[in-house]
Amino acid sequence: MSSSSPSKRKIFNDPVYGFISIPNDLIFDLIEHRYFQRLRRISQLGLTNAVYSGAIHTRFQHALGAMHLMTEAIEVIRSKGIEITEAEANGVLVAILMHDIGHGPFSHTLERSLVEGVSHEDISAIIMDRLNQEFNGQLDLAIPIFRNQYPKKFLHQLVSSQLDMDRLDYLKRDSFFSGVSEGVIGLDRIIKMLNVVNDGLVVEAKGIYSIEKFLISRRIMYWQVYLHKTVLGAEYLLMHILKRAKELADRGVELFATPSFRTLLYHHYSREDFLASPEAFESFLSIDDFDILTSVKVWVNHPDPVLANMCRKLAQRDLLKVEMQNHPFDPTYLERVFSKALNKYGFSPEETAYFVFNDSITNSAYQPHLNKINILFKDGTVKDFAKAFDNEYIAGWSEVVKKHFFCYPKGL
Amino acid sequence: MSSSSPSKRKIFNDPVYGFISIPNDLIFDLIEHRYFQRLRRISQLGLTNAVYSGAIHTRFQHALGAMHLMTEAIEVIRSKGIEITEAEANGVLVAILMHDIGHGPFSHTLERSLVEGVSHEDISAIIMDRLNQEFNGQLDLAIPIFRNQYPKKFLHQLVSSQLDMDRLDYLKRDSFFSGVSEGVIGLDRIIKMLNVVNDGLVVEAKGIYSIEKFLISRRIMYWQVYLHKTVLGAEYLLMHILKRAKELADRGVELFATPSFRTLLYHHYSREDFLASPEAFESFLSIDDFDILTSVKVWVNHPDPVLANMCRKLAQRDLLKVEMQNHPFDPTYLERVFSKALNKYGFSPEETAYFVFNDSITNSAYQPHLNKINILFKDGTVKDFAKAFDNEYIAGWSEVVKKHFFCYPKGL
Amino acid sequence: MSSSSPSKRKIFNDPVYGFISIPNDLIFDLIEHRYFQRLRRISQLGLTNAVYSGAIHTRFQHALGAMHLMTEAIEVIRSKGIEITEAEANGVLVAILMHDIGHGPFSHTLERSLVEGVSHEDISAIIMDRLNQEFNGQLDLAIPIFRNQYPKKFLHQLVSSQLDMDRLDYLKRDSFFSGVSEGVIGLDRIIKMLNVVNDGLVVEAKGIYSIEKFLISRRIMYWQVYLHKTVLGAEYLLMHILKRAKELADRGVELFATPSFRTLLYHHYSREDFLASPEAFESFLSIDDFDILTSVKVWVNHPDPVLANMCRKLAQRDLLKVEMQNHPFDPTYLERVFSKALNKYGFSPEETAYFVFNDSITNSAYQPHLNKINILFKDGTVKDFAKAFDNEYIAGWSEVVKKHFFCYPKGL
Amino acid sequence: MSSSSPSKRKIFNDPVYGFISIPNDLIFDLIEHRYFQRLRRISQLGLTNAVYSGAIHTRFQHALGAMHLMTEAIEVIRSKGIEITEAEANGVLVAILMHDIGHGPFSHTLERSLVEGVSHEDISAIIMDRLNQEFNGQLDLAIPIFRNQYPKKFLHQLVSSQLDMDRLDYLKRDSFFSGVSEGVIGLDRIIKMLNVVNDGLVVEAKGIYSIEKFLISRRIMYWQVYLHKTVLGAEYLLMHILKRAKELADRGVELFATPSFRTLLYHHYSREDFLASPEAFESFLSIDDFDILTSVKVWVNHPDPVLANMCRKLAQRDLLKVEMQNHPFDPTYLERVFSKALNKYGFSPEETAYFVFNDSITNSAYQPHLNKINILFKDGTVKDFAKAFDNEYIAGWSEVVKKHFFCYPKGL
């Protein structure tokens, strides 16, 4: 990790970690690439800043941060006598740097409206192959590590698992910028306690309380930030705006948009067509938060009252009222509110459903069935975290918590 | 400051201070106003994030932060026996909250290109009068305090002076987000040491070292961040892009733009016309960073090669190379580079001057002639900070440092 | 809280909170009193620094910190419309400042060895009465608040309950100085969310995740710091040293000690005698960490091999080996080790038991039976924290966890 | 630096840096040695906690911290292509760990009273030789590096120069614990910018503002903390206490003291005798803050009124009043106060001089004549920091500031 030419021996100032050093020339060049530079204009948390006004950090910052943690993890794991060759180190660093490269603006929202059926994993796969070509095979190791096709499985776990560097960075960074101190985690100790047993990532028993705190912090970040009811409402609103815009475009109605955004609005690609079309692909990689939000602002004055109304709500932060509870809503209550809205706005039922709708979300503190966190004890035994306490203390943690929410305009 | 209705007893999470409490209903309503909400989409430091990728905080966050510090300053000053009535406290809080309300996107750049001759102070003045009307005279005290027309002069100094809450917040916040720890200042002690003598703001002598550190931090932030050569180059580039766009618009060339941005691009208002025109005014208040940067991205493909070239440089972060030095550049050197550029690009001299240009900037650590910082000693005497050390230590601090810089495309 | 004379308008620099302001003259004078000044020489965490070398902060710092939090809590509660008169505010501030005044050095250890039967609460009671006399009744409100004899019960809860300012400060401070980031809590939000319903302290529902994190942090601090096995071993060692010293003193053996420490070593007071004896009382208030640890260092060379051996272990940090587990130790294992020690050292069984011994400790994350944390919901209902989640998530938290430990010399 | 056996792969929790890893077994064993363990009971800043109550951190913490920074500096310098062999790395780590090993309690005070003429450097030299013997020559490289007798001179500069790791750690740590945020420095950038040119330590030009801020912070820490007038007064008081005690001991008067302290009190060693005497040496290494302060507490009741009076002042924090100014005191003023004291206390003039005395101190922000900080520019030139600004800005920084102070009892 030490072979950088002086001109590329760059360090980034980072509010979270102080400094982030670029470990080598390939990584420097990947960061400079326009596919990566676009992440500067894609916020990590989408519309979360409607509630947490500081949460405007970008995917660019997050990707650098995750790479920074990876350099530390590599150093720790090597110091425990586990071999990671220079080529593997480079591979795993590139893999983590690129893990989010396929994300578009407001990613989860777009995947459910503008580019239905196309996932950011699809896009990532294509981009990584292209970059490998462009960089003459220098991603030959990074790609199989990323896709879990490399023999040393723990390298993939550093990129994608319950304790990957992605997750460690985003929890730390998201809590930092949102100002939610409840989400702060002690990264240093978790990373210091990483080790590898039987080709699997483990945490040494001395770090068990750090894992406990990490899981709680993660749980709290979900309920307090990621699934905050007002944020959810805003994200659904944006999804509905894009659905409506696409509907109008289908009907040939004129909509203000940048050329790339227009391409995506006025076409209907199947997943296969999309991935095969250079035009669709380039358009997708050209749009960012700016394209979307600029259009939303302009559409405030669009002749379609449904679109205009939703855009005004989002642009001027007159957000939907959102109720959230642990049990399903009473259908008669839902219906009563819906009728009121029908009467008040004079839109059709389909149109009214853009403003008045309900749905549910789930989360759990620890998901042992998906992806265990393994604890290494002094005597060499390895146990699932959930079994590492021989009492009932964390028994409730794997329960899946489901919450129901209901959105409608203020003043209804 | 305690009369808020429960529904408006809001607190904001802030990465810098933890929490910011909204002191009363008027301030809550002003924050909710769309004139203020637009500050959410105007970054505090413009293009600085081209170098410091974390520096993407907004004028919205800064205005809330400065108001937060003002609540602390009021409490400290009152505790020293100086009277600040509830109405005055409210006035000074509104004044600081509104101090940046007239800023547009990339403010200083725009004032020198798109809306020449119109300053953000002009806009602020109009906005505050409008809001005062809209809020039935509730800004009757805030406005004279803001304009230094209120008898208690120290209230204005809290809003605008060498030690105002604006400055304290922006230095803290800008260093925090840019990750430049050299700029970090100890706000707490400065604020605790504020006092008022003869209607003028002073700092008690025990805080003298905090002022010393504050001035050094400020000096360093100027050279390391605000006047960073690459940032300067990027800002000039944007200014030239806007000038070129306006030039093209004057000639009737079609340019992609949001409707509001288009209004400003395709009109030439004199300062007076601008301020009198509701259309100009509304357009100005509708644009933000998103309008500008979206157009820059689209203009990368504009038929005008000069515009397209500059936009590509900015959008893909292929920024100008910038040399900076303490003495003027040798004219023959400047000319040699300029000729090279002329030959290489084939643009006219006027067009080439968009890419190859030089200028100078100045700054000094302490400007006693402009606005003193007064120190209050235990025996009751008050001295200018520059005289408070009876030795030569800070003698050099008031020297005006001038730096010359020269920008040209990479690879020339 | 604003009536301090200028000369006593002191602020303390505090590594945790930045600054701590002294709210009035009475509090200034109480801090200056020698009973309070002795807390400067009594460490908050006793021998914990044997493991966490930074944990050397004092009871003096903690008491000031808790008082600082109380000023914030008072401000928050008043801002919610709950009346706290100036006299009550002063009372509750004095009560929290004095809450630890009766602690001696290594308090829990001493209470089980040197001054058996005398609790720090006994001493506190006497001291507060004396100070009230000395300060002409200025503690007339503080004392009943401290003793829960004041009508407004929530004031006592701020001093002593599951969410008192004592606890909030010590968790924050202990994790800060020990460097255990897992123990860090978000005080600001907890305090901002305090409110009073039916004369009882409650936390508003928006703060529920902060309470969740607080309880977890507290749980972790117990297992990772307060009940750390090596710390436990060191504390038992000191307790055994003092017991042995007292035994020798009883037999008339000469022991190096400061005069005050000598008084306590060479007398046997019943609880009643102790509390009635001015000599005992003054001696107790004269000793601090320095008296105890200086003697331990000197006793390394004492002719009694049992005492000398234990003192050498403590002074040179050759601490006992400690095993800890969730189930009781196998008696035959305990016996086998004990026999080995008997043979190796040649001490009597009673003497050997100073070095080889076992015991157990308990803790639980939340103790609803003792002292509920009540959550106030938006609809005005108040629920116990344990009932505030309508699912099984925290079901295991009230389980009492019991751990068994076994100590013996290294190299046995 | 990677060859530690698993059992010694220890990490220390540190409030300042989070974690400090022990790089190898030798360093682990040196830390465990009783010569090093005594630093746990020697505070870094002596009596400074009389003013800054948090400043109770120890020389043990500081030595570990400086070693931690050294591991970072080694890594940075190696990454720039400068060779540091494993043996040299180990040598420089041991050298910095041991740099303060010869310090006794209240070191500068003791050197001017109890053990006049014996410096901590003398003691360090002996200890390092002894440890080298005890550890079979494993300090063979550390010792010449420490004494600047090793060919690669920059290694010594990392241990002792204007930018050594000692200084970087103590400024950071002292400001952290004292809570004086004005002293906070940006270590990370300074260390990242270290490089070596012509076997001399340099700072790359990009770090020049960090050096500027570092020097200012250091200057402020001197005036605000290290040379704080009340702290100075307390240190002189302790020095006078020890002088008086020694005077009484010379006269055969009985004084309470631990055996080791007694040895030093009741003997008069010349420097040569002291260094040759195993008894003196062992006694010196046995005493720490506890021995000194315990005696001071006991001497409060000593029959000698001069000693008792000074001890009472120190123990109960009834400290001397201290005036400080930039010009010498008027001799008639000094005399007038002295006469008053003579009359009031009835002590002899010699005795009175223990309580009423004046002296002076000096400091400067940058001392280029002693030890330059060299800046490496992009073009390869190296300039003294003072010359690196080509203007007058820092002209005043090398001025030696002298301050005069005058101490006398309160209420005189």
Image: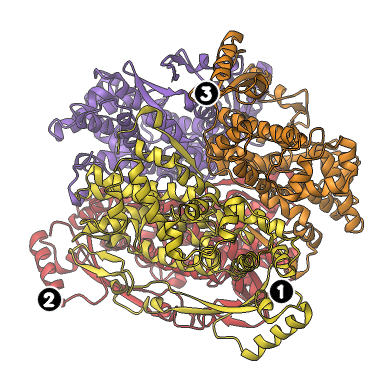
Chain colours: A red, B purple, C yellow, D orange
Badge 1: few (under 14), some or many (20 or more) residues near its Cα, within 10 Å?
Answer: some
Label 3 marks which chain's residue?
A: B
For marks 1 and 2, give the CA distance. 72 Å
Q: Amino acid at mark 2?
A: Thr
State the residue lying farthest toward the front. C252
Of A222 and D237, which appears nearest the observer? D237
Question: Can you tell which mark lies on residue C4?
Answer: none
Q: Secondary structure at mark 1?
A: loop
Could you confirm whether marks 3 and 2 are on the same chain?
no
Q: Secondary structure at mark 2?
A: helix
**Of circles 1 and 3, which is in front?**
1
Of D353 and C103, which appears nearest the observer? D353
For marks 3 and 2, give the CA distance. 71 Å
Left or right: where B48 falls relative to D225: left
Of C77 and C269, which appears nearest the observer? C269
Left or right: where D79 falls relative to D129: left
Image x and y of residue D280, in percent:
83, 45
Q: Quickly name the residue at label 3.
A: B350
- D142 in relation to A89, above or below: above
Question: Can you tell which mark lies on residue A332?
Answer: 2
**Of circles 1 and 2, which is in front?**
1
Question: Can you tell which mark lies on residue C409?
Answer: 1
Could you confirm whether marks 1 and 2 are on the same chain?
no
Quarter of the figure with residue A195: bottom right
Label 2 marks which chain's residue?
A: A
